[in-house]
Amino acid sequence: MPITKSSRDLVDEAMEEVRTYTVAEVLPRLTDPRTLLVDIRDIRELAHGAVVGAFHAPRGMLEFWVDPASPYYKPIFGDEAKEYILFCGAGWRSALTAKTLQDMGMTNVAHIDGGYAEWVKQGAPTETLEAQKARRADKHS
């Protein structure tokens, strides 16, 4: 059976319904404790670099991680005072995921237009995956 709606149609529809930020709008919020950048890229994509301070939550698990009734729930997603700003490689998966989280009832979710590719293009701060892991380990020790 042929599809009746393309993936691009889904992304375009999501973009109409979700809050979208530019990299320039997100940069001043990097140190804001009320903001959490959420990297939804596949773990293999992180080998190309990571956004400084971002929390990795693979797209395939995010719905379960934000749901308090799920056995996979992560309390980091339970702070209603935070805004969760998602990003992926190009901004398509993050738009779809932000829309899904809104459909689940989250009102404090947005995404970055252009994703990680635009982040890098704008010269925003990145780090290696190893540096990110080391920073997290220092934070929790």
Image (cartoon, helix red, strand yellow):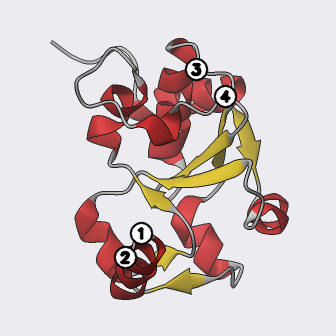
Q: Amino acid at mark 1?
A: His
Quadrant position of residue 15: top right
**Image mark for residue 137:** 2
Label whose residue precedes the other's in the sequence (2 or 3) = 3
Figure check: 27 above or below 94: below
Figure check: 100 above or below 74: above
Which of labels 1 and 4 is toward the front? 1
> In the picture provided, is 27 more to the left or to the right than 47?
right
Q: Amino acid at mark 2?
A: Ala
**Image mark for residue 102:** 3
Q: Which residue is mark 4?
A: 80
Quarter of the image with the C terminus in it:
bottom left
Q: Are marks 2 and 1 in contact (CB under 8 Å)?
A: yes
Label whose residue precedes the other's in the sequence (4 or 3) = 4
Of helix, strand and loop, which one carries label 4? loop
**Image mark for residue 140:** 1
